[in-house]
Every structure is written in C-alpha cells, then in structure tokens.
Image (cartoon, rainbow, N blue to C red):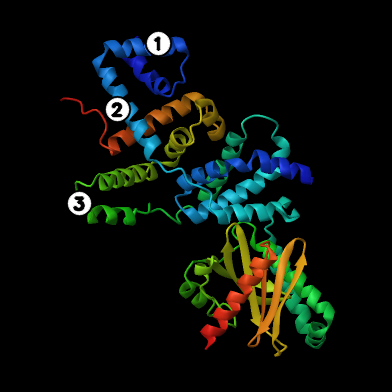
Amino acid sequence: MRCADCRDAIHAYVDEELSSEEQGDVREHLASCVDCRREHEVLVVTTRRLKEGLVRHHAPDVLKARIRSALAQPDAFESPADPPRRSWARLAAAGVLIAAASSGLTFAAMRHPLAQGATTTDVLASHIRSLMPGHLVDVASTDQHNVKPWFNGRIDLSPAVPRLDSLGFPLIGGRVDYVTGRPVAAVVYGRRQHMINVFSWPALDRSALSPTASTEKGYHLVHWRNEGMELWAVSDLNLAELQQFVAAFGRSDSASAR
Amino acid sequence: MAQRDVERFERIVLPHLDDAYTLARYLLRDEHDAQDVVQDAVLRALRYFDGYREGDARAWLLTIVRNCCLTWQRRHRGDRLVVPFADEVAERISDSPQTDTLAIEHSQRAMLERAVATLPTEFREVIVLREVEGLSYKEISDVVGVPMGTVMSRLARARKRLASALGLDVKEAS
C-alpha cells in the first residue's frame, strides 16, 4: 500500500468501516511507515477527545411534556403550514367585532351559566394550544422579575407571578393569550413533566370565589376569583397536586399584594 | 391517525428523543431553539409515520430533525452570527489554580466545544453524527443526503480542522 492510499483510507480504518481485508492492508502499512503512523496517532487522539469530551444532551422534561401533551390531542396532526395561532387570532378578531356590535348581549351572556362552560372550553383550548411548538411562552424566564414587567404595555393588567420553585413548581415564563375574545395573561409553571397554565383577567363579578375544580378531556381546571381577578389554573397534573399548587399560588398572591 | 399508531410511534420513535435533542443543540447552538425545533420535528415525524416502514428509527428521526434545523436556520439567517462564548467555563478556569487537573479538563472541554461550534454546519453535522451519535457512514449518508464518499471527505476535513484547533496536528519539520 502506498502512503497516499493509506491517508485516504485511514479515517475509515479508525472508524472500522473497511472490509477485513482492507483493514489488514492499512494495519500492515502502518507497521512499516513512520509518517502514516504519526498521522494515525493524531487521528486516534482527536476522535477520542471528541467522543469523550462532547456532551450528550438529555431532552429536558419540559420538552418531553410538550411532546406528550401534543401527541395526546388531535391538533397534533394538523399541517404546520397553517399554525393554529393564526386562525385563533382571526377567530379572536371576529369575536371582538361581534362583542362590539352587541356588548349588552355579551355582558348578559357572561352571567348566564352557559358562559361558564364556554370559558372552560376556551381556557382548556388555550392550554392545549400553548403546548404546540413555540407557543408555550413569549417571555421565557425562571425569574419573576423578568416575567411580571414583561406584561406592562402588552395587556391592561399586572398578573400575579409568585415564586414557587421551592415548592417544586418552577416558573417557566409568560405570554398573552385570548380567552372568550379578550386578551388574558398566561403565566406558566412546571411540575416534573407537566405544564401548568395560570390565566388571569379582570373579573366583571366582584364577589370572591373559592377554588372550584372541574375535569375535561383528562385535564384538570381550577377556577377561583380573588381581589377582582378571574383566575384559572389548567394542567394534566393530578388534581391533588394542582390544588396544592393553587393553594400555594393564592397564598403568595395575597401575601405579595399586601 | 388511530390511537394504536400513535402508541406505536411513541414506542418506536420517542426513545430517541435525547439523540434528536443532542443533534439539534449542536446544529442550532441554542437550547430554546433546539426544544422548539425538536418538538416540531417529532410532530412532523408523526405525520410522516405512514411512510416509515422498518429500519433504523433513530436515523429516520435524526434525518427529520436535521432537515428541520436547516430550515429553521435558513429562516433565521443572520439572527445569530455570533457563537456564544462559554463565559461560565472560562471564569471557573481562571479562578482555579493552574495545576488543578479539573481546571485543565474544563479548559480542554471548553476549547473542544468551541472548536466544534465554530465549524461550518456541513462539517459540524458529520462530526456530531459520527462522534456523539455513533452513526455508521451509511447512516450519516442517509441522514445528510449525500454519497458516502462525501461523508468520508467531510469527516476527514472536519477532523483535520479540529485536530489543528486543539493543537494535536502533526507539526511537519521544515
């Protein structure tokens, strides 16, 4: 074997991609040629450094949770060419028009028990939509001092963003979303592989409401009303832990308000 | 798609999520971008799952992830031309005594990460597929969509650059 042939084959030799006959030829040449041997040594050290030194990443729990949630609902099979958010924005715009045309009617409907069902459906749809790629948060941060000011100027309210990571509910971020045709604040927390969306907007009904749980399509929703805000927490987390979350959220919220 | 197919997909494809995420991290050099692109790639994979018959599910998924990463990069070209420097690692090194073997290891690792991060994408992808993911030449050729000969020459050139960046290359006596 000539040196030029050896240099051509040496990567495949190191990667054990040659036939046994070719491997033998290269081995034989290396035994007799100092220059090629030195080239071979450099290559062996280089590949070893790469194999040992380069990090093998682990898919984060948040990513796994987003994928699992997306696979669990049929929207996952929609074409990505038409992102759901766009059609939802259009729907929301239509909602605003209708609301403007008949605000009296809308207001009446809000007090009707049926409206509660519509809100539940909307809140749940918003939660599920948030699990689609790139839709979870518009501001990604584990720091409440980044998330809370982000809402300034984007929405006419300042949502509660308590810090709950010491209780095992790390903050993931926030975004502005639409529920029943109005912009709402969504603050996102994690729990192992699960996401929790907390939606809030100013309440029309000023009376307080203690946390009320419901279950739909395998998701748990907890609704409560506090200090003039409607609050909804939604997750596929088990109900006991979601209620624990709501209790902690409520405590920190009223503590920080004072 | 039937629930049965989704379950089959979860069983066959999802075990390779770490590999998919690793490739996306190296190609995009950003953890948030990598998460978004991998999620998109997995949902695409589910839609193409009818087309997947038998064979290596890992290489199949990596092909989709790789294509999604390249599409993403084309769409966001110019957003991020600067390679982030590992400040954290550098600080740790300068704080530690020179003789500390851990510090040397950290500095070598940082140098290595940086050498790979600054490779052109076509070289970086073959290095990651070979040295991190451990794919064969044939599998790399399928994932990247180029002939085996091209895989070999890219791998050789990428390794030469890395050896030189790491100060390992043969110094020819002149």
Quarter holding the N terminus of chain B? top right
Residue occupying the far left of the picture = B174
Q: Is residue B70 above or below residue A230?
A: above
Chain of the residue under the numbered disc 3 shown in the image: B
Q: Quick check: can you spot residue A2?
A: no
Residue position for label 3: B97
Chain of the residue that carries numbered disc 1 in the rendered image: A
Q: Is residue A185 left or right of residue A45?
A: right
Q: Nearer the viewer, residue A168 or A174?
A: A168
Q: CA distance from mark 3 to mark 1?
A: 47 Å
Tell me the subunit letter for badge 2: A
Number of callouts in the render?
Answer: 3
Q: Quadrant of the C terminus of chain B?
A: top left
Instruction: Report the front residue among B74 and A117.
Output: A117
Q: Quadrant of residue A250?
A: bottom right
* Relative side of A119 to B31, left or right: right
Sequence order check: which comes first, mark 1 or mark 2? Answer: 1
Helix, strand or loop at mark 2: helix
Would you say B57 lies left or right of B30 here? right
Residues marked 2 and 3 touching at CB (< 8 Å): no
Confirm whether residue B116 shows in the render: yes
Residue at 69%, 68% (x, y): give it. Answer: A89
Disc 3 crowd, CA 10 A, few/some/many (<14, 14-19, 20+):
few
Residue B58 falls left or right of residue B7: left
Q: Secondary structure at mark 1?
A: helix
| Percent of width and height locating residue B131 | 43, 34
Q: Residue at x 76, y 67 (%)?
A: A215
Indicate the secondary structure of the residue bearing disc 3: loop
Q: Which amino acid, mark 1? A: Gly
Mark 1 — residue?
A24
Dot 1: few (<14), some (14–19), or many (≥20) neighbours within 10 Å? Answer: few
Q: Position of residue B39 (x, y in %)?
A: 60, 51
